[in-house]
């Protein structure tokens, strides 16, 4: 039997899935660092312990998580690592099955098991570490999770199963966390949650997203505040006033609409209709001129006919969203929709997704051409080869358009803002030059 290492533990955290998982990994790493434990994120450096933070949202995400765990199991069997721990949404949802199928994993933890995970890693959970995280994003922007869980009853979604009910994080705690992030050099806060627009209802008995945005904008050195995942039903209109009137709040809205067919919206249990959805988009654009709207859609939901898919295409064509993503429907156990027959063939789902994205590509191209000749404030995220890569306030990292500047012609500092004149545009990128 191979003797256990007596060297000081080195931990590698691997994160899969969405920005909420990134945030959770950062909190875990902050706790480990406070316990004087050597921890890194997705490092190639030697580490004797690996923690995989999994995603269990849809089939593709589950498959990626399982494959990653299997890769680390093989590494453990080969003696490259000593211990393997699995946490996150997949582990929360399928823990008994995973324990049975993957006995070489030392222990599985759910989404609310941070103190137990820390104990297994030889660390104490420190309650006083409000807002202390080891951020994995570039130092000038950070995700700020403002609530956990979700109280919505969407038929296709397993998030409440994995994350539990909605729980608001108090404004005072979030402001303190923002102040600490700003002191570390963060200039952009990206507000995330399973449902941003529900914020405050459980704790304050009223929606408080607008108030939170104002309080965060008062934090020195924070220059951009961006909101993600705003649920469309019962949208708090005072949020639009803040976006329009507060210069620190990006003119940007991420709002997952999922579909437009009345039949499917009802089956999806979205609590809205085609007319209400269209009127909401019109209101956004009327109340906040120039707002950039990102949405996500689902194709191939049970019962989606050619007629209903055409309604969705017509809606995309009519609405001209600035940014758009598409998911093919995933038949998830223990959700309301799982009782329905998954009767849209996989090839049809993917064909429909491609058709939506082809349409969106042409829309994005036309919208980007209108930006040529205009000057924008751009935050630069990184340098790749001979080019600086940045974003306007209308774009979120990793998912939206980017601004590209030739490093041979201009000098820019990563993490700084610069005024950039757009000289050329394609479907998803803008090309610019520095305005002196």
Image: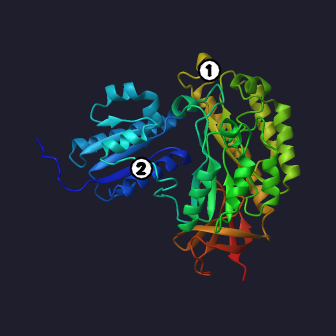
Q: Mark 1 points at which residue?
A: 336
**Secondary element type, mark 2:** loop
Find the distance from the CA under tag 2 to the CA under tag 1.
38 Å
Q: Position of residue 200 (x, y in %)?
A: 68, 41
- Dots 2 and 1: beta carbons under 8 Å? no
In the rendered view of the protein, which quadrant contains the C terminus? Answer: bottom right
| Residue 96 picture quarter | top left
Q: Where is residue 386 in the image (x, y as percent from the top left)?
A: 54, 74
Q: Mark 2 points at which residue?
A: 126
| Residue 88 picture quarter | top left
In the rendered view of the protein, which quadrant contains the N terminus? Answer: top left
Q: Which of the numbered marks, if any, corresponds to residue 68?
A: none
**Is residue 147 in view from this perspective?**
yes
Residue visible at 85% across and 50% down in the picture = 285
- Of residue 110 and residue 426, the one placed in the foreground of this image is 110
Residue visible at 28% across and 31% down in the picture = 103
> Could you tell which of marks 2 and 1 lies nearer the N-terminus?
2
Identify whether 106 is placed above or below 40: above
**Secondary element type, mark 1:** helix
Residue visible at 68% across and 62% down in the picture = 224
Identify whether 89 is placed above or below 143: above
**Is residue 397 in view from this perspective?**
no
Asked whether, in this view, residue 170 is left or right of residue 13, the answer is: right
């Amino acid at each position: 039997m191979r003797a256990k290492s007596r060297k000081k533990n080195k931990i590698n955290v691997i994160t899969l899935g969405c920005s909420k998982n990134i945030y959770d990994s950062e909190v875990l790493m902050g706790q480990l660092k406070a316990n004087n434990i050597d921890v890194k994120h997705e490092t190639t450096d030697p580490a004797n312990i690996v923690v995989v933070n999994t995603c269990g949202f849809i089939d593709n995400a589950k498959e990626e998580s399982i494959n990653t765990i299997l890769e680390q199991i093989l590494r453990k069997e080969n003696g490259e690592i000593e211990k393997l721990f699995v946490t996150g949404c997949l582990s929360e949802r399928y823990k008994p099955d995973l324990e049975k199928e993957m006995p070489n994993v030392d222990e599985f933890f759910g989404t609310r098991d941070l103190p137990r995970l820390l104990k297994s890693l030889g660390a104490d959970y420190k309650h006083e570490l409000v807002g202390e995280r080891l951020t994995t994003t570039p130092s000038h922007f950070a995700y700020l999770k403002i609530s956990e869980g979700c109280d919505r009853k969407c038929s296709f979604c397993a998030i409440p199963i994995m994350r539990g009910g909605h729980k608001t994080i108090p404004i005072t705690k979030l402001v303190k966390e923002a102040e600490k992030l700003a002191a570390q050099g963060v200039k952009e806060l990206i507000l995330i949650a399973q449902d941003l627009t529900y914020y405050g209802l459980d704790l304050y008995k009223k929606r408080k997203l607008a108030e939170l945005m104002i309080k965060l904008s008062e934090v020195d050195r924070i220059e951009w505040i961006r909101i993600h995942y705003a649920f469309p039903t019962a949208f708090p209109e005072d949020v639009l006033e803040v976006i329009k009137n507060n210069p620190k709040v990006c003119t940007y809205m991420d709002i997952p609409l999922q579909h437009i067919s009345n039949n499917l919206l009802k089956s999806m249990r979205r609590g809205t209709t085609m007319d209400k959805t269209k009127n909401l988009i019109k209101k956004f654009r009327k109340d906040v001129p120039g707002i950039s709207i990102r949405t996500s859609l689902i194709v191939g939901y049970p019962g989606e006919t050619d007629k209903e898919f055409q309604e969705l295409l017509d809606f995309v064509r009519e609405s001209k969203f600035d940014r758009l993503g598409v998911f093919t429907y995933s038949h998830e156990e223990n959700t309301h929709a799982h009782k329905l027959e998954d009767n849209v063939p996989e090839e049809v789902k993917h064909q429909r997704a491609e058709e939506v994205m082809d349409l969106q590509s042409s829309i994005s191209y036309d919208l980007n051409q209108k930006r040529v000749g205009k000057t924008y404030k751009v935050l630069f995220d990184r340098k790749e080869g001979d080019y600086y890569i940045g974003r306007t306030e209308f774009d979120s990292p990793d998912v939206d358009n980017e601004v590209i500047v030739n490093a041979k012609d201009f000098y820019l500092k990563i993490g700084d803002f610069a005024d950039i004149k757009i000289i050329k545009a394609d479907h998803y990128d803008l090309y610019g030059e520095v305005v002196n």
